[in-house]
Image (tube, coloured by chain):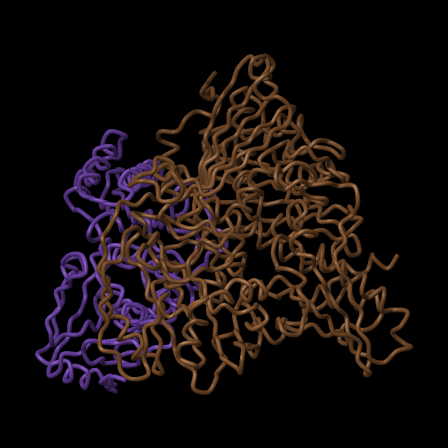
Amino acid sequence: MVACDISKAVRRVDAVSKSEGTIKYVSDYSFDDCLWGRLVRSGIPRGKIKAIHLPDLPEGYRFVTYKDIPEGGHNYLHMIATDWKCFAEDEVRYVGETIGILVGPDRTKVEDLKQKIVIDYEEMTPAVTIDEGLECKGGAFVNSDNIHCRLSLNVGDVDAAFKKAAKIVTETVETGFQEHVYLETNGACCIPEGDHYVVYASAQCPFYIAKSISPLLNLTPDKVIVRQTTTGGAFGGKEHFPDVVCGPLLVAAYVMKKGVKMFFDREEDIENSVKRHPSKVVFKTGLDKDGNIIAMDSTVCYNVGGYLASSFVVLQRGCFHVTGCYSFPNIRSVGLGVATNTFPSCAFRGFGAPQTLFAVETHLCHLAEMQGLDPLEYKRRYFIKQGDTTSTNGKVVERVMIPEMLEQVMKASDYERKAREYKWGSGRGIGISFYNHGGAFTGNGEQAIIKARCQLHKSANGDVEILCSQTEMGQGFHTILPKIAAHVLEIPMEKVIFKDPDTSRVPDSGPTAASRSTMIVGELVEKAANLMKPRYDKEEDFTVETHYEHPEGFPWDQSTFQGYAYLGYGWGVCAVEVEVDPCTAEITTKGIWSSHDCGHLIDERIVHGQVNGGVIQGLGWGSTEVMQNIGGHFKQTSMSDYIIPTSMDFPKQGVYFVENPYQWGPFGAKGMGELVFNGSAAAYIDAVSKAIGKRISSIPLPTEEVMTYMLHGTDLKSELQEVR
Amino acid sequence: MEELKCYMPKTLKEALEIKAKVDVIPLAGGSDLMVSHKRTMGLTPVFEKPVMIIRNLPELKRIYRNDKGECCIGAGCTSEEIAENTLCPWHLRQAASRMGAIGLRNSATIAGNIANASPKGDTPGPLYLLDARVKLSSVRGDREELVSDFIVKFRQIDLQPDELITEIIVPYSEDDFDYIFWHKVGTRKANAISKITVSQAIKFNKDDTVADYRVSATATGAKTNRSRDVENIIIGKKITPELTEQVIEAFDKVISPRAMPEFRREATRRMIRRFLSESAKRPKGKVIDTYEGYSVTGAPTPRS
């Protein structure tokens, strides 16, 4: 099988242009007679707009609001749900909510005029945290209970098991906001052209934008052509959020009959963009007399913010991952998407899974430690295996190689010796975590919602163009997909063309999200290349098309969330070793070792890069990345106070893989872009907890918090609170 | 677009003449001013007054020893120039080498770090510790003032309208002490703002009594903290655990951190305790840090 060499690293196709700085980003484009736009946003978290006072606007300048949406148009952005308004009308639900867009020909003038706009509000009491949302502080503003969305899962009989339990303990685990900090901030241009509009945007999902914003002008999505521009990072922050940028641009372009462009600077982007959902997971776990888990109940609350948008799907994925890499006999989970007056939360690498995975890993550590056990000893009792039942009453379809991966990580990190020698509270600690990530859309999403299509076109000169809507955002997909095609066709990669998508010329192969691009679209390209191969030498100019087909025999019911949620999971094991400064509580990470199963690797270096970045991004989420929301306002709004790790914060990583080809993936590959984020924070917190000998159940964990735990924390061996 | 009036003197003399006549904002590295005056992406910063660029005045770029052996650092020297120059005292080199990222260190100047009078500034801690003075020049002549007096309070300095900071004079260095300590707890390991920084130095007499002891702390109040009264508790005496605790408690009363007070107070206490107890053991070497084997992962080491 040729599959063995596809893993060998090649030079990324965008390596040179990005290193040289010659590649064009959206803010590098210029269009004749294009106006500048600047969003005017709510300065309060909750209230009514009483009046908007505009300065005298010179000719050519206009303040565009919901009132400018033409008859038949809809003032919403279609992101799964349709509740997020393009422009606030009389009510504002969060700081940063778009009220209008000021447009005009001179950039400085637009800014000066914007500074002179005054908005009068009738302020109302905001609910900012999950608890405040649940308490309906200031009165409910979504439904009668501030719950945007809810779901429940049930496997076995938790109540019956609780009756038999020797002990039921409870614990709450919390995680905070996380900002994406893509290198390139958000920006887009919208240009009217004849009977349609062309949108240029730094974005992950061009077809999402067309679908989301076209109803504003009551257009069909094909009348809004989206051309993705080179995208300098996204991490989920450009999955739905570009709709919020492009919607007002579209309305402004319609009103002004001219192109309009808008780019955010870093502060504007951090203050006024989506974040990872903060979470609060409350466990109730039933133990038998030997301390074994017989039932686990969890309430999973995510801070959704002012509008639901895509959050229900994030919450679903969160609940589906709440049992982690384990099989427990009885499981119940209730998910609640809580409405608050914060910027709506949205997709972020992991899409809801990291929060619950962190929660279950941390809870298991504490269950072990209160019994005086090393968490690893305890966790390995419950490792899930092929054929075992999942949290949605489906089965694990594939072989699970956690034991082999654990072996690699233990050997590389010298885990056993260190876990034995580093006594709890000794200032040194080694932690370990287990995690997975269901590849592609949940359940029947791929066949019922996305219905991905992909084409390969061969030209007379022998070049083959891949036509699909997948985007390069730094992850390497411009290299991965041509590599798959070239490999099947046995032609040089240079003969394979793969451009940034333009929705008017490529079929919709779905969003670049959910770790689905290689796994699903890569497979479509592999199939298409196999169809093309016998005809390649015989025919000059032809196109082949493939569409997604779901393997038979793996049912899913989206109304009850029962069945096979994912056919292929990525799996991960990560160990982290730390040392704590006894004077200052600073944590120094001494080692990071991970092993991942992402099927067969399409390109070792790209996968390696994803591991390095994902693990560090997860460690940032767990340690320094504090993002507070005080009274509805994000407090950290610049790169100097929102603290992402630098390359000096963490040491070189030990990176390992296992070979476990996925039967429905290209060359056996599975999704892995999100997986690699999902587990490092839990391993880090496990290590820090052991080093200081105190129980830690919330992140992030900046230095001052470590000191607080050192001074006032609960001993690792103390019992978790009992409930009945 | 508004026009920005900008002066670019070629010599210090010229600069001082402009400063005497016009109300200008002196700009050297620009690493604070360009950030605080920036507007949104793509727009020119707006300054409320004319700007005088003094970045390349040769008179402000020298580092040398004066006839008293004191280290004199030109106001326009960048953090990186200070970090790399072994004429500069060790504490100051440490602080300069851990300020921001390399791009900032190549631009930010020591005078700017003093003049912005931020309680989190990196260089004032060592400068207070070593009794450093600023030289203030104007067409009227020169005067000198302790850095600790020159920084009046949060964001306020004792600078006359016609004056420029031209030099920083540091009378002490690590050679005057037996043991030295400098530790910055940053928001991360590099490119970080200080959460707290403690600088210490000690010298012993032959009979093991303390000849001199100094401690300063940054980010613990409206300005950098140091108190000779606190240091005097232990000077002339032998280090004992009881005296150490007295120093710690007295210094705790000097500092007044507003944010994260418990962390800042506790870390300060522990760093003083560590330094005094370790130096009392008279270990080999000169530098004492927070614990054996402390290392900032990959942090830049000053070249010497």
Query: Where residue A452 sits: x, y (%)?
Result: 70, 59
For residue A7, side relative to residue A25 (left or right): right
Residue at screen point 79% across, 41% down: A553
Q: State the residue lying farthest toward the front.
A: A71
- Residue furthest to the left in view is B140
Q: Relative to residue A392, is residue B79 depicted above or below?
A: below
Measuring 62% from the left and 66% from the top, which residue is drawn there? Answer: A472
Query: Which chain appears brown?
Result: A
Task: Tell whether B120 sits left or right of A238.
Answer: left
At which x and y percent is residue B7?
23, 85
Give the letter of the purple chain: B
Q: From this viewpoint, is residue B294 visible?
A: yes
Instruction: State the residue in front, A21 or A320.
Output: A320
Q: Position of residue A286 (x, y in %)?
A: 56, 19
Q: Is residue A671 visible?
A: no
Q: Nearer the viewer, residue B8 or B301?
A: B8
Q: Nearer the viewer, residue A492 or A581?
A: A492
Question: Residue shown at 19%/43% (left/top)?
Answer: B231
Please state the horizontal and vertical placement of residue A633, each as a whole percent of the image. 32, 52
- Quadrant of the image containing the N terminus of chain A: bottom right
